[in-house]
Image: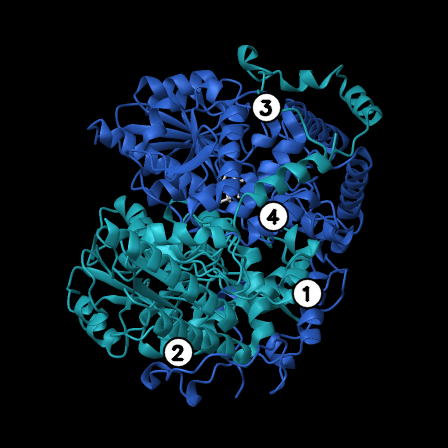
Chain colours: A blue, B cyan
């Protein structure tokens, strides 16, 4: 990894440098209304660079990143699996990449076919009656879902339902979505086994409950062992059950959420179906629904009549959540990924993801305690060894020195000092063993030379960064010193 | 199996270590009657087969070329080769949101630079690290305006000149807040809309250039809007800002935009880039991530995600938005694009768009039966009223692989003959002339048919 950061773009800018050139204007010029145009005083202060400057700058930046392509990246809840290069090749095909979203439908049959087939794949994999590919990411899938729940109850004339139940292990997007959708979030505790506390849930279930948002496997990496009872409790009071599908990787070919009675769910294609995370996105968060929510789906969705594909807006749609047809490039990658796996390949993903997690857990759990003593799914939540003054954050930072990305830290909130580890199916046994060895070595350091751990990282381009300073004296953009 | 590193031997060793006989035993918590369902999908394809299947799909599309005049929220602009070469580096594409800052400086500095570039372009103080797309950025800007009034103002005045998709997304987002969206029932000028702002109004949203391509002068608009106590949101095409005055200098409070023209392929509608920028006083209400500069423990400059207390992972149900994954890689593309263009390149592109669009419009206006409304100046798009229905005209030109434009009837009932035409630096004079010739042919054939009827 590169040991220093390049200067900011403006710091190497020199007047007169340029990296692009265009041909002379080949048509007669039309006068530009002068009142609308930037005057010289408002000259645009963009950097002026040569093409080589631009290439070196961004190449050097890239060399200060850890990524799946360079490093094991066991970030829990994020499913950092290998992102196949095939998918990039497909997304780059001219027929897809240069295809305009408002081209006539007759000239777009290839793209529409992809969308339709992906809808069908998703329905089949998760056991739903219909799907919409509109949402741009998991959180937007959640928004689509909770707005559908709202529309469903309103359509039945039921305005009493104002609350949505959420387990305390849930991801932050769940409660944030509930508020954005005009509902009140009600937190349900977890029990000693790491499941939703069924008794506490039943106590909350009344006719004001619009639904439950549940992640299964949950964020502790555990399959809710009483999931059917949980779902019935909510259905019995007239609520709907929303599945947060972020952890679908563990259950591909193992169980279909729709079969369990989940009414609607989002998928994180950038997790389960391996579209690259891109340093924070783009993703794609399609929603699948059972029969009764079909009319409310965000549109448009793609329908097939014979060999012809067309767009269709569901009759009681919650509306449009994004311009055009969802993050098509990501949908295309996910479609390709499912094609090369087939049903057996999908099951192999779940098997290896869950086996890897359990094996890694076994290798470290004597030193890094895991509160819930039962087989995990694709991930597990460990805690640091007992050592004075050494915290989860320190262990995470020290792992960076060992050439590994850190696990997710301090989430879920219900485990103090959580280290949430998700190896994914892509990694082989040797990598897991090397990672476990690093963790055990760090545990020894923590008791023998704790300052090695608390002062980490030391091999990275910058050492620990002052987050308090960043928040107290925010510098959010470059400003020239002139 | 592809993409799995364990060999059957590894699997056996690992199962042995766990005291298990098969992977099936790992799933004992799953209700038995639903365990291991049959999944009815086609059997796996090899990489070679998959490429063949997908090429076949790709070949059934008619992608944009120099003979494409499609715009309406996504435009065919030139993408310098450096953008793909750099943005496709695995260190950028296969990293996550930069939670571990020390090993994510590349992503963080690039986001900081993106924020700085867009701040410069829009004349705003703060830019977030991206939103999903232009439409969701508009929707969140409207939501933010409502929240900025502590939910006391629940009316959002929206111009008909804002892209119809942005308007529908805004309605879907605001529905749950019981807010009112008005103003877009008729085509009104920005000045007329500003006059509709009252004590209930959270914000006015206008688009520049507007959906129909028009560049209304926004000078003085902010004063009227602010006098009513409302905020001004301007939704922009970032390419236009290489040439035109930035909304910041015109008093806008929030600027949103569709960032697709900044080095992002049209790709059938996504992934794109939602630009979201505002003034400093609104910062605590801003949705999305922010990269900020700080120092490391050795006093060296470094970057982190900051002001997180607005966000869902800290504030949960009290967060400013639920957004988590954004469009980071698209922000990187925009940063590379703008670094490569510089102020001169961006202005040249904008001027090429302007002059070629005006040339095309005048040529079309000279064809019998076609009219173009020149009352308001336009940037790179304009509306043509055709002698026949725009849908049939588009269909008629398709066999020549000409993508003639977007029939407005898809968005605007009653405008069957209107066609939205977009001209950019990608359409040289020769292509425009070919287009004009084809238009005159289709129109004359149709004219004769109609005459014969
Ligand atoms: C459990 C869970 N739910 C929801 C989300 C939100 O998904 P996204 O980041 O795609 O919006 C995430 C991921 O960040 C997650 O881990």
Which residue does the numbered mark 4 point to in the structure image?
A: A91
- Residue A481 drawn above or below residue B29: below
Residue B418 sits in which quadrant? bottom left
Q: Are marks 4 and 1 on the same chain?
A: yes
The x, y position of residue A215, in whole percent, is: 49, 31
Q: Chain of mark 1?
A: A
Q: What's the residue at 21%, 28% (across, down)?
A: A158
The x, y position of residue A33, in whole percent, is: 33, 83
Which residue does the numbered mark 3 point to in the structure image?
A: B41
Q: Residues within 10 Å of mark 2 (few under 14, many from 20)?
A: many
Q: What's the residue at 47%, 25% (across, down)?
A: A196
Relative to B338, is B201 on the left or the right? left
Q: N-terminal of the two: label 2 or label 3? A: 3
Label 4: state its secondary structure.
Answer: helix
Q: CA distance from mark 4 to mark 2?
A: 34 Å
Q: Chain of mark 4?
A: A
The x, y position of residue A258, in whole percent, is: 47, 22
Q: Is residue A376 visible?
A: no
Which mark is on residue A61? 1
Q: A146 or B69, which is in the foreground?
A: B69
Q: CA distance from mark 2 to mark 3?
A: 53 Å
Which residue does the numbered mark 2 point to in the structure image?
A: B244
């Amino acid at each position: 990894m590169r040991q220093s950061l390049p200067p900011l773009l403006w710091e190497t800018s020199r007047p007169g440098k340029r990296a692009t050139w265009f041909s002379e204007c080949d048509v007669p010029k039309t006068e530009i209304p002068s009142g609308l145009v930037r005057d010289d005083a408002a000259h645009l202060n963009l950097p002026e660079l040569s093409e080589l400057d631009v290439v070196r700058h961004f190449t050097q930046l890239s060399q200060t990143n850890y990524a799946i392509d360079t490093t094991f990246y066991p970030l829990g809840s994020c499913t950092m699996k290998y992102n196949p290069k095939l998918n990039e090749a497909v997304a780059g095909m001219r027929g897809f990449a240069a295809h305009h979203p408002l081209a006539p439908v007759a000239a777009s049959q290839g793209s529409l076919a992809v969308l339709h087939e992906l809808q069908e794949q998703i329905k089949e994999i998760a056991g739903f009656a219909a799907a919409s590919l509109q949402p741009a990411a998991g959180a937007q899938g959640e928004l689509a879902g909770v707005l559908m729940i709202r529309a469903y109850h309103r359509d039945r004339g039921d305005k009493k339902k104002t609350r949505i139940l959420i387990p305390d292990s849930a991801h932050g997007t769940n409660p944030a979505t509930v508020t954005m959708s005009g509902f009140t979030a009600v937190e349900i505790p977890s029990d000693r086994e790491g499941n939703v506390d069924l008794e506490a849930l039943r106590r909350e279930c009344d006719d004001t409950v619009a639904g439950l948002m549940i992640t299964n496997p949950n964020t502790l990496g555990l399959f809710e062992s009483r999931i059917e009872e949980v779902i019935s409790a909510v259905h019995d009071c007239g609520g709907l059950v929303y599945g947060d599908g972020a952890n679908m990787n563990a259950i591909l070919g193992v169980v279909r959420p729709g079969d369990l009675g989940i009414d609607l769910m989002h998928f994180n294609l950038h997790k389960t179906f391996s579209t690259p995370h891109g340093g924070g996105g783009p993703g794609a968060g399609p929603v699948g629904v059972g029969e009764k929510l079909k009319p409310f789906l965000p549109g448009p969705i793609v329908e097939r009549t014979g060999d012809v594909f067309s767009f269709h807006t569901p009759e009681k749609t919650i509306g449009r959540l994004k311009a055009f047809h969802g993050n098509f490039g990501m949908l295309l990658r996910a479609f390709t990924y499912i094609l090369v796996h087939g049903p057996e390949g999908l099951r192999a993903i779940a098997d290896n993801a869950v086996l890897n997690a359990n094996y890694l857990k076994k290798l470290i759990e004597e030193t890094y305690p895991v509160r819930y003593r039962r087989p995990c799914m694709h991930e597990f939540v460990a805690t640091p060894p007992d050592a004075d003054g050494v915290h989860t954050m320190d262990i995470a930072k020290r792992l960076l020195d060992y050439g590994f990305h850190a696990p997710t830290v301090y989430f879920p909130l219900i485990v103090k000092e959580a280290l949430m580890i998700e190896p994914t199916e892509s990694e082989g046994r040797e990598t897991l063993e090397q990672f476990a060895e690093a963790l055990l070595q760090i545990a020894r350091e923590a008791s023998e030379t704790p300052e090695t751990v608390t002062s980490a990282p030391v091999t990275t381009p910058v050492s620990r960064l002052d987050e308090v300073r960043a928040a107290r004296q925010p510098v959010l953009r470059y400003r020239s010193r002139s | 199996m592809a993409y799995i590193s364990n060999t059957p031997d590894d699997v056996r060793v690992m199962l042995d270590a766990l005291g298990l006989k098969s992977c099936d035993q790992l799933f004992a918590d799953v209700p038995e009657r639903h365990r291991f369902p049959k999944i009815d999908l086609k059997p796996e394809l090899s990489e070679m087969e998959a490429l063949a299947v997908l090429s076949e799909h790709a070949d059934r599309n008619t992608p944009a070329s120099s003979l494409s005049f499609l715009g309406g929220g996504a435009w065919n602009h030139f993408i310098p080769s450096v953008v793909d070469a750099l943005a496709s580096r695995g260190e950028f594409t296969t990293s996550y949101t930069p939670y571990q800052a020390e090993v994510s400086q590349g992503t963080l500095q690039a986001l900081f630079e993106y924020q700085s570039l867009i701040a410069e372009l829009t004349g705003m103080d703060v830019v977030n690290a991206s939103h999903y797309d232009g439409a969701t950025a508009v929707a969140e800007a409207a939501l933010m305006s409502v929240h900025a009034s502590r939910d006391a103002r629940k009316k959002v005045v929206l111009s008909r000149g804002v892209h119809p998709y942005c308007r529908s997304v805004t309605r879907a987002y605001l529905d749950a807040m019981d807010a009112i969206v008005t103003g877009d029932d008729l085509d009104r000028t920005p000045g007329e809309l500003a006059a509709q702002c009252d004590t209930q109004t959270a914000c006015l949203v206008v688009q520049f250039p507007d959906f129909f391509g028009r560049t209304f002068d926004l000078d003085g608009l902010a004063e009227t809007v602010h006098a009513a106590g409302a905020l001004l949101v301007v939704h922009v095409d970032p390419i236009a800002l290489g040439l035109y005055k930035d909304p910041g200098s015109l008093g806008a409070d929030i600027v949103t935009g569709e960032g697709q023209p900044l080095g992002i392929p049209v790709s059938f509608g996504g992934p794109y880039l939602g630009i979201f920028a505002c003034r400093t006083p609104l910062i605590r209400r801003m949705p999305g991530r922010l990269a900020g500069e700080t120092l490391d423990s050795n006093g060296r400059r470094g970057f982190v995600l900051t002001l997180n207390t607005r966000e869902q992972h800290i504030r949960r149900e009290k967060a400013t938005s639920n957004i988590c994954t954004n469009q980071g890689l698209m922000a990187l593309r925009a940063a590379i694009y703008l670094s490569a263009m510089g102020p001169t390149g961006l202005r040249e592109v904008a001027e090429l768009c302007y002059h070629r669009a005006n040339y095309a419009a005048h040529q079309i206006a000279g064809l019998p039966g076609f009219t173009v409304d020149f009352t308001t100046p336009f940037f790179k798009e304009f509306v043509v009223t055709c002698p026949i229905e725009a849908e049939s005209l588009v269909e008629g030109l398709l066999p020549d692989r000409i993508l003639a434009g977007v029939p407005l009837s898809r968005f605007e009932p009653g405008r069957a003959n209107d066609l939205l035409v977009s001209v950019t630096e990608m359409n040289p004079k020769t292509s425009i002339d070919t287009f004009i010739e084809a238009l005159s042919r289709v129109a004359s054939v149709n004219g004769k048919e109609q005459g014969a009827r």
